[in-house]
Amino acid sequence: MKLTIYHIPIKMVLWDTVTMKTTLELPDQLLRRIKMRAAERNQKLKDTIAQLLELGLASAPKHDAPTRAPKPVQLKKHGPLTINDIETAIAAGRD
């Protein structure tokens, strides 16, 4: 018996064919509204959330140029940062 091996090139398009799981933190009131909407339309919660995200993205304004991330801040004469240092810097940036 002869075994023939075929190599078939496959182009993977992950974003169109694969679903991904993620965790969202939503305000309680918003989640209640989404659950009610899903129940009223006899849909699964995940389908309702996906539909609402698609609608939101479709109606969002388009940006002409992609935004760039800001350059990292370079600290002079400073040792390793602590969580407290980072939280203080974030809070100061909000003022």
Image (tube, grey):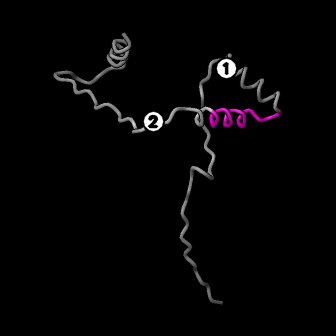
The residue at which mark 1 appears reads as 30
Residue 68 placed where, x, y %?
A: 35, 35
Q: Is residue 11 above or below residue 46?
A: below
Residue 76 image-quadrant placement: top left
Element carrying mark 1: helix
- 76 horizontally vs 84: left or right: left
Residue 50, magenta (yes or no): yes
Residue 81 placed where, x, y %?
A: 29, 22
Which of these two is toward me, 29 or 56?
Answer: 56
Residue 29, magenta (yes or no): no
Residue 78 image-quadrant placement: top left
Please state the extent of the stretch shown in magenta in the rendering. Answer: 42-55
Residue 74 placed where, x, y %?
A: 22, 27
Residue 47 placed where, x, y %?
A: 72, 37
Hey, which residue is sitting farthest left in the picture? 77
| Quadrant in the picture for the N terminus | bottom right
Mark 1 or mark 2: which comes first in sequence?
1
- Of labels 1 and 2, the one closer to you: 2
Residue under the image location 26 percent in, 24 percent down: 80
Residue under the image location 61 percent in, 85 percent down: 3
- Magenta stretch, main secondary structure class: helix
Tag 2: amino acid: His
The residue at which mark 2 appears reads as 63
User: Between marks 1 and 2, how big is the CA–CA gap?
Assistant: 27 Å
Q: Is residue 28 above or below residue 62?
A: above
Residue under the image location 60 percent in, 84 percent down: 4
Element carrying mark 2: loop
Crowding near the residue tagged with mark 2, few <14, some 14–19, many ≥20 C-alpha atoms within 10 Å: few
